[in-house]
Image: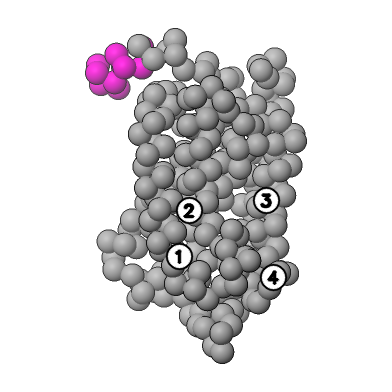
């Protein structure tokens, strides 16, 4: 670690939440990275709000093909970046919501990994529709969302009720995205090969099934990680 970064971390030690004695598989980021990330919370909030605005713009074509009633469940990644922005901002302002924290973790973990998963699995289709710089941006920016998820445990205890709310929201997303659409066809992010035919979006196999499998696995693992974090904090007597 450079002397400048070490000095910054030393100055911040008294202003940041104390680290919890979590195993590496629950807190994979180095302590220094956590500290610097939390110290730059307002900058990260701003970046995520810009990402949210870009994401809504990116979904503009899908919005035009989806019934308006389902729009809140369509832009998964922009909503996830909004959740983490609001979570960090609420913590900095001393008005944090544990439900918002759990939603932010689920969103960053799930969309931060699901999007790279489909970008890699269906790389030919995505590269045909996007330039290499845009493809690289989508891949890298979503992976950074997964990194952001592991800042949240420093200021959240993931109570069961908050995790239940996050499971309900992202479980509903999985349900209408892949299995039981409320109106029209399934509402997941558009994937290579999909077309709008007679006002309805097509869903090709096995693309649809692979995307669904990734989404469900990530919802389940987010549930496990948040509840495991709470258990480890309880065992250490660190639940606030």
The reply to whether the C-beta atoms of the residues labelled 1 and 2 are less than 8 Å apart is: yes
- Asked whether the viewer can see residue 62, the reply is yes
Q: Earlier in the sequence, mark 4 or mark 2?
A: 2
The residue at which mark 4 appears reads as 181
The mark found on residue 74 in the picture is: none
The residue at which mark 3 appears reads as 169
Distance from Cα at disc 3 to Cα at disc 4: 15 Å
Q: Secondary structure at mark 3?
A: helix
Nearer to the camera, 94 or 136: 94
The residue at which mark 1 appears reads as 59
Distance from Cα at disc 1 to Cα at disc 2: 9 Å
As drawn, 112 above or below 161: below
As drawn, 220 above or below 24: below
Q: Earlier in the sequence, mark 3 or mark 4?
A: 3
Name, please, the residue furthest toward the front: 68
Name, please, the residue furthest toward the bottom: 198
Residue 111 place in picture, x, y as percent:
52, 53
- The tally of labels here is 4
Which residue: 40% across, 53% down?
A: 53
The residue at which mark 2 appears reads as 78
């Amino acid at each position: 670690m450079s002397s400048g970064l070490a000095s910054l971390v030393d100055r911040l030690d008294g202003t940041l939440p104390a680290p919890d004695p979590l195993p590496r598989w629950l807190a994979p980021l180095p302590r220094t990275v956590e500290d610097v990330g939390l110290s730059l919370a307002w900058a990260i909030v701003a970046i995520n709000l810009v990402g949210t605005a870009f994401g809504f713009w990116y979904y503009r074509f899908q919005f035009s093909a989806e019934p308006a009633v389902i729009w809140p469940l369509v832009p998964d990644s922009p909503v996830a970046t909004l959740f983490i922005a609001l979570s960090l901002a609420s913590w900095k302002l001393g008005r944090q919501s544990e439900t918002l924290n759990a939603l932010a973790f689920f969103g960053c973990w799930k969309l931060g990994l699901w999007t790279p998963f489909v970008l890699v699995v269906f790389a030919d289709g995505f590269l045909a529709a996007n330039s290499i710089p845009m493809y690289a941006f989508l891949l890298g920016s979503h992976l950074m969302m997964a990194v952001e998820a592991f800042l949240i445990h420093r200021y959240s205890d993931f109570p069961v009720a908050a995790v239940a709310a996050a499971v309900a929201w992202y479980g509903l997303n999985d349900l209408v995205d892949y299995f039981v659409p409320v109106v029209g066809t399934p509402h997941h992010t558009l994937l290579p090969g999909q077309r709008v035919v007679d006002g309805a979006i097509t869903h090709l196999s096995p693309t649809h099934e692979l995307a669904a499998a990734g989404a469900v696995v990530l919802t389940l693992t987010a549930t496990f990680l948040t509840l495991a974090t709470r258990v480890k904090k309880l065992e250490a007597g660190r639940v606030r």
